[in-house]
Image (cartoon, grey):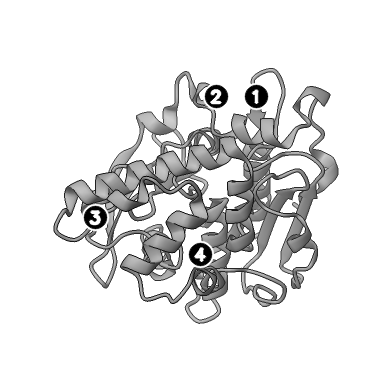
Amino acid sequence: MMLNAESFRPAPYLRNGHLQTILASSSFRAWGKNPMCDAAREMIMTTSGGIRLLGFYSPQKSKKSRGLVVLLHGWEGSVASTYILCTGNALYGRGYDIFRLNFRDHGDSHHLNQGIFYAVLLEEVFEAVHQLCRNAKQKPVFLTGFSLGGNFALRIARKMLQTPIPNLRHVAAISPVLDPAKSTSKIDQYPLIRIYFLKKWIQSLKKKQKLFPAIYDFADLQSLKTVQAVTDRLLQKYSDFKSACEYFKEYSLLEDTIKDLPVPVTIITAKDDPIIPVADFYRLELNHRTNLVIHAFGGHNGFIDGFFLKSWYEQKLADMFDQIILSA
């Protein structure tokens, strides 16, 4: 099943990128019963290098599992982000087991590793996803990432050129970051978005410092007013990168960098996304396995419509995964 841009046409009052972006993470959308959360049990994935990542596994209880869906959140999000909870619950209701994975230092996982999170840390996330696929045995597995998680999902798909994962059947990337330098600039451009991310990031770093006071001192970061400034200072003090430019380039996905993906991929984005410039998607070189869907509306991680403010992709992803299983 191929998704297309014509299949999402929100009500006129929801055709605003900033509103869509705010609604995507608004906690009231996740109110009410969530059978996926009720079924969840905590799991720690340990990589070959000793890195530990926290996740939550929700197996089917009353029906046979159709497969496993692994969900990756965005930067400074977590397994408890609204878009993760809502998407996971929708897919759980359609018969899929769900695994929600926290990146390092996201959610309540700061204590698990001494090192701090950087978006370039692909290997540990790839290993965790690979382990989950092996544990699923013969079940089909579907990987879905949002924003920075979408960027990770696409890099995992690319890494499968060297390390195949036979039962990872499809990768979906919602509002994926392609050019982190531009996205950082966009975040800093809009005061509400900048304040939101800065507050969450500084709180996260404070938590890390409290756990490892002999290693980290982030006091000088708290006076900085932009995400770019904090990035520059953090890289200078606690990384081997010579500049933010070098760091951003390490996980950029531009032009021909994902043209040879060996697994079927769906990329979903919106022209009115205030954080991810749509122009970069038009310049991507993609092969026949990759379906690029560019909506006129949807904001960042949003694609919300209807009285109950559900995301368009929640059921569409399930429809697509169902069709993949049926056509196998």
| Sooner in the amino-acid sequence: mark 3 or mark 2 | 2
Q: Which residue is mark 3?
A: 217
- The x and y percentages for residue 78 are 42, 43
- Residue located at (78% from left, 59% from top): 279
Q: Which residue is mark 2?
A: 29
Q: Nearer the viewer, residue 200 or 106?
A: 200
Between label 4 and label 3, give the one nearer the viewer: 3
| Sooner in the amino-acid sequence: mark 1 or mark 2 | 2
Q: Amino acid at mark 2?
A: Arg
How far apart marks 3 and 1 lie (CA) works out to 41 Å
Q: Which residue is mark 1?
A: 309
Q: Which quarter of the figure has residue 236?
A: bottom left
Q: Amino acid at mark 3?
A: Asp
How far apart marks 4 and 2 lie (CA) works out to 32 Å
How far apart marks 4 and 3 lie (CA) works out to 43 Å
How far apart marks 1 and 4 lie (CA) works out to 33 Å
| Sooner in the amino-acid sequence: mark 4 or mark 2 | 2
Q: Residues within 10 Å of mark 3 (few under 14, many from 20)?
A: some
| Sooner in the amino-acid sequence: mark 1 or mark 4 | 4
Q: Which residue is mark 4?
A: 167
Question: Is 231 left, or right, of 46 in this rendering?
Answer: right
Q: Is residue 325 above or below residue 163?
A: above
